[in-house]
Amino acid sequence: MLSADEWTILALSLRVGAVAMAAALPPAFALAWLLARVRFPGKVLVDAVVHLPLVVPPVVTGWLLLLAFAPAGPVGSLLQHWFGISVLFRWTGAAIAAAIMALPLMVRAMRLSIEAVDAGLENAARTLGAGPWRVFWTLTLPLSLPGVLAGAVLGFARSIGEFGATITFVSNVPGETQTLPLAIYSALQQPGAEATVWRLSGIAVAVSFAALLASEWLTRRVRRGLHGV
C-alpha cells in the first residue's frame, strides 16, 4: 500500500506528464510537419536545435531554463511583469522542463508518420480543387494520426521519467516539484528507505509500461479505422 505522500507524488507526476504532453503537442506537430513537408534555408539547423535536448546533458537544459525563467531572465521577467507569476520551484516549472525534454521524441514520431503519408495523394487533392487547409484536415492529419497519438503518449511517458532538467530548474520540493524520479532519488539518499525505493520504482515502471502499451493499442486501433478493418 502507498502512503499519503507517495499518492501525492504519483498524482503530481501524472499531472506534470499530462500538462507537459498537452503543452508540447501543438508545437511538436507543427515542427514535425514543417520538417517533413517544407524545404527552407537552415532546415538542418532547425532539425538539430529541435533534437538538441536528446544529446545535451539534461542538467544543461535545466540550467538554460533556469537562466531563461529566472526573475531577471528574458522569459521570467516578462512573466513577473505582465502576470506577476514565477514558475521557479513550482510544478508548472517541472511541466515546462518535462515538455522541453519530451518534445524531440514527439517530433520524431510525428515526422516519420507525416513523411509516410503519400505526397501524391495530397497533390491529387490539390489538383481537384482542395485548398491547403482542406488537404491538411482531410488527408494529412487523419493519415498521420497514428504517429501523432504514438508521439503524444511517448511524450507523456518521457515526461513522467524526467529528472535532470527538472531538479536543476525547479529543485526537488516535496509536494510541489517532487515527481517520481526525484522522489526515488531522495529515497536513495535515506538509510533504510529501500522499501520506498522499490515501491516508487515499481510505480514508475508500471506507468511507463502502461503508456507504451496504450501507445501501441491506440496506433493499431486508428490504423484499423483508417483502413476500414
Image (cartoon, rainbow, N blue to C red):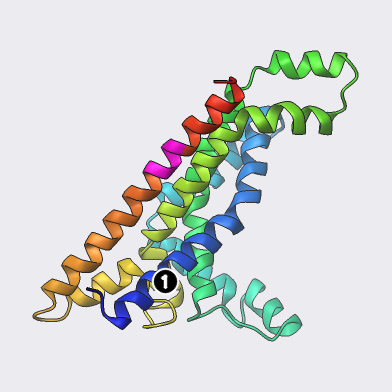
Crowding at dot 1, Cα within 10 Å, few <14 / some 14-19 / many 20+, comes out as some
Q: In the orientation shown, which residue stands out farthest toward the left? A: 192
| Residue 64 seen in the figure | no
Residue 119: x %, y % from top left: 69, 18
| Residue 118 seen in the figure | yes
Q: Residue at x 61, y 38 (%)?
A: 32
Residue 68: x %, y % from top left: 58, 70
Depth check, front residue: 21 or 166: 21
Q: Taking 69 as reference, is 147 above or below it?
A: above
Q: Residue beneath label 1, please?
A: 11
Q: Is residue 11 left or right of residue 191?
A: right
Magenta range: 213-217
Residue 102: x %, y % from top left: 48, 52
Please tell me in which quadrant of the rendered image residue 5 appears: bottom left
Residue type at the position of mark 1: Ala
Q: Is residue 42 left or right of residue 186?
A: right
Residue 216 belongs to magenta span: yes
Q: In the orientation shown, which residue stands out farthest toward the right? A: 129
Numbered disc 1: secondary structure: helix
Quadrant of the rendering where the C terminus is positioned = top right
Q: In the orientation shown, which residue stands out farthest toward the bottom? A: 84
Residue 168: x %, y % from top left: 40, 72
Q: Taking 107 as reference, is 208 above or below it?
A: below
State the predominant SS element of the stretch in magenta: helix
Depth check, front residue: 33 or 214: 214
User: How many numbered circles are shown?
Assistant: 1
Depth check, front residue: 113 or 170: 113
Quadrant of the rendering where the N terminus is positioned = bottom left
Q: Taking 5 as reference, is 123 above or below it?
A: above
Please tell me in which quadrant of the rendered image residue 71 appears: bottom right
Q: Residue at x 60, y 34 (%)?
A: 145
